[in-house]
Amino acid sequence: MNQFEHLKEEDCGEQEMKDSNESDGGSVNNNNNNIRRKMVSPGAGEHPLQYNYTFWYSRRTPSRPANTQSYEQNIRQMGTVASVEQFWKFYSHLVRPGDLTGHSDFHLFKEGIKPMWEDEANKNGGKWIIRLRKGLASRFWENIILAMLGEQFMVGEEICGVVVSIRFQEDILSIWNKTANDQVTTSRIRDTLRRVLNLPPNTIMHHKKNNHTHN
């Protein structure tokens, strides 16, 4: 058990924003995509994270062709956390990925990095992709973000963020890193993923370079 479990506030519970927010993943400001926002800092007595992290949400229309401009317009910044306590307070009020509908995505990236492969931090990087059967997304999403915030991957500044993508027949979990050609780093990330998610040995994972694909 790491500091995130020890310090989880008892009054957070499992309250979720399911009324007006269920269709959009949480409380979202449609005009908040400007990455240069007021810096978030840990409060007095709080336990700071090594990096600040920003939650994002996107929802796609499958029949509509994807392009960079439409994707950037569709993604919404939800909020930034700088401490363990801020994370649990924010996270406990989010709808769980398994309760989302349609082509919906939650993203958690280091502050200052947009969850787009065109971002400067991502353009030379890649991502490990794991396809999940329905019903696993919420638990795996929580495990992977706790591992990322707790610096369990031990690859320095390589990790950019993680994404959970809800689809109709399966869900997709991915973790993005800065340097796609660094085989030592990508292998360490893969091995840590297997451990923190307790994946069976036969789980299919593949690493894809960002400059070879769109989101």
Image (cartoon, rainbow, N blue to C red):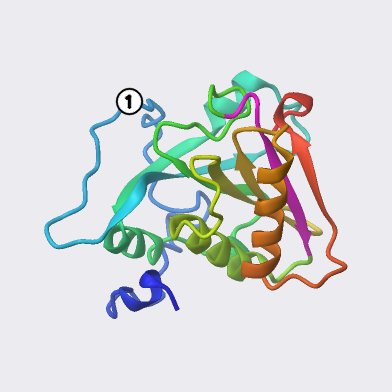
The amino acid marked with disc number 1 is: Arg
Q: Is residue 129 magenta?
A: yes
- Tell me: 111 left or right of 125: left
On screen, residue 65 above or below 59:
above
Start and end of the magenta stretch?
Answer: 122-132
Tell me the residue at 57%/61% (across/down): 144
Give percent across and percent down for residue 173: 68, 54
Give percent across and percent down for residue 141: 58, 62
Q: Quadrant of residue 170?
A: bottom right
Q: Is residue 62 magenta?
A: no
On screen, residue 97 above or below 1:
above
Give percent across and percent down for residue 24: 50, 49
**Res. 174 visible in picture:** yes
Tell me the residue at 55%/35% (across/down): 115
User: Which of 33 and 211 lies nearest the eye of the viewer?
Assistant: 211
Q: Secondary structure at mark 1?
A: loop
Task: Decide whether the magenta segment is chiefly helix, strand or loop.
Answer: strand
Identify residue for label 1: 36
User: Which of 117 and 153 lies nearest the eye of the viewer?
Assistant: 153
Location of the C terminus by quadrant is top right
Q: Residues within 10 Å of mark 1 (few under 14, many from 20)?
A: few
Residue placed farthest to the top in the image?
Answer: 69
- Tell me: 29 left or right of 129: left
